[in-house]
């Protein structure tokens, strides 16, 4: 496949590149908002970008975007990846906002989308539970209607986010149905609502997740997002966006370029590392892997743009390639650095700012948007048409495993 970008798209790319080059100090590149100070910095930049429409170029001007398309959104996302930008509201921009475009009411779009595109608010999606990860339909958090209010009780875990959210998009069971997935509903409410508590869940590599507890959280009908008991289908729509973006390939390309430059400048036994045939082979393999990922992400961006004509996204390989590359490439980079690869950010002896050690740790904890195994299950069904294990057989297998223990 061979394609190019329009003159307008390349102009947008340069405009975005120059904007971030002016605004970003080198020492915070690719550092998430894991403290109030970092969150304040990223929020300030997020609002500056939001005022220019850079956060959501593919959204309509009425919702705060630039009125462009999915390809332009991909351009913006790719530039953000190059600069290692970690928006505090990445989930709202990449997942919740696009989902609201599809299943939100006109009033909800009017209320929520401008706040997302302006960079003013931070959203978290609260879907995963201790017993509902890959099995999305097994939600135990419950929302019970009492009069004109919904009372929500339950727990969510591994919720991606940095320092502090404003709004939560929560999946809860509103009916006991067979099959289970037909009784779920989405709710949106403030993270400051009485009954909401949160505990940080630090992960390897500086990645942050959270645990949320809901104890008699009371919300009104206005908190319902989409249709009652149709939340499972809405969540499946949001997952299309969660696992697909051009950010990762751009970030990986920059990491590769920095590693190549390091190998050119660093000598071992009097020879630059780049002269080592094994290292050259490993770097070439990384370059091929990254290009495959890049093409897959752009295929997905184009496919989103053709949604009205072709229907929902048929399949997406970016999640698979991103995880495979992340796991394999971090090991390659670690091996090239040798013992220096074990040094963390902050050490005066660390090479490449200590990012290699951090990235290796990060890829040991890749559960956001589904683990590698979860992505494989999705592709097995959607692309290969393989059947799932029947629920009854799966239960028998799990019982047998428990007996073995």
Image (cartoon, rainbow, N blue to C red):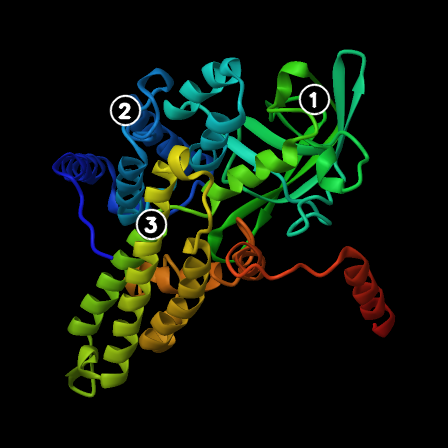
Across the whole image, how many numbered discs are drawn on residues?
A: 3
Which quadrant is home to the N terminus? bottom left
The reply to whether dot 2 and dot 3 touch (C-beta < 8 Å) is no
- Residue 381: quarter of image: bottom right
Please tell me which residue is depicted at 71% across the width and 61% down the height of the picture. 389
Residue at mark 3:
299
Q: Residues within 10 Å of mark 1 (few under 14, many from 20)?
A: few
Q: Residue at x 59, y 22 (%)?
A: 190
The x and y percentages for residue 388 are: 67, 59
Q: Are marks 1 and 2 in contact (CB under 8 Å)?
A: no
Q: Mark 1 highlights which residue?
A: 194
Crowd band around label 3 with a 10 angstrom C-alpha radius: few (<14), some (14–19), many (20+): some
Mark 1: which secondary structure?
loop
Q: Is residue 286 above or below residue 211?
A: below
Q: Earlier in the sequence, mark 3 or mark 1?
A: 1
Task: Check the image and report above or below for 210 versus 8.
Answer: below
Across and down, in percent, residue 73 comes to 31, 36
Q: Nearer the viewer, residue 54 or 6?
A: 6
Kind of element beneath mark 3:
helix
Which of the two marks, 1 or 2, is nearer to us in this view? 2
Look at the picture and state if 192 lies above or below 315.
Answer: above
Q: Nearer the viewer, residue 114 or 269?
A: 114
Separation of residues labelled 3 and 1 (CA atoms): 44 Å
């Amino acid at each position: 496949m061979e394609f190019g970008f329009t003159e307008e798209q390349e102009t947008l790319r340069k405009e975005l590149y120059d904007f971030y080059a002016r605004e970003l100090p080198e020492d915070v590149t690719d550092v998430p908002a894991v403290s109030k100070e970092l969150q304040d910095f990223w929020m300030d930049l997020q609002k500056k970008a939001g005022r220019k429409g850079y956060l959501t170029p593919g959204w309509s001007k009425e919702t705060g975007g630039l009125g462009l398309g999915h390809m332009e959104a991909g351009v913006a996302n790719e530039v953000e990846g190059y600069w290692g930008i970690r928006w505090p509201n990445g989930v709202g921009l990449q997942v919740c906002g696009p989902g609201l475009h599809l299943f939100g009411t006109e009033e909800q779009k009017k209320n929520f989308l401008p706040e997302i595109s302006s960079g003013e608010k931070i959203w978290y999606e609260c879907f995963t539970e201790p017993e509902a990860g890959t099995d999305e339909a097994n939600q135990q958090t419950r929302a019970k209607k009492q009069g004109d209010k919904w009372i929500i009780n339950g727990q969510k875990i591994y919720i991606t986010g940095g320092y502090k959210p404003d709004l939560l998009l929560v999946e809860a069971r509103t009916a006991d149905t067979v099959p289970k997935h037909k009784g779920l509903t989405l709710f949106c409410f403030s993270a400051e609502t009485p009954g909401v508590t949160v505990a940080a869940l630090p992960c390897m590599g500086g990645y942050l997740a959270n645990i949320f507890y809901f104890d008699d959280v009371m919300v009104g009908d206005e908190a319902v997002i989409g249709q009652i008991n149709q939340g499972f289908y809405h969540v499946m729509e949001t997952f299309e966006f969660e696992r697909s973006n051009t950010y990762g390939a751009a970030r990986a390309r920059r990491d590769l370029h920095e590693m190549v430059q390091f190998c050119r400048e660093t000598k071992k036994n009097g020879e630059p590392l780049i002269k080592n045939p094994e290292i050259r082979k490993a770097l070439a393999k990384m370059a091929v892997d990254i290009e495959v990922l890049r093409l897959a992400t752009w295929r997905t961006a184009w496919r989103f743009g053709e949604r009205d004509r072709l229907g929902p996204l048929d399949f997406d390989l970016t999640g698979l390639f991103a995880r495979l590359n992340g796991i394999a490439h971090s090991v390659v980079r670690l091996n090239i650095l040798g013992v220096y690869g074990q040094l963390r950010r902050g050490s005066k002896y660390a090479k490449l700012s200590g990012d290699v050690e951090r990235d290796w740790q990060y890829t040991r904890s890749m559960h956001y948007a589904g683990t590698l195994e979860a992505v494989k299950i999705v592709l097995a069904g959607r692309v290969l048409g393989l059947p799932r294990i029947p629920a009854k057989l799966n239960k028998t297998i799990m019982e047998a495993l428990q007996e073995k223990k």
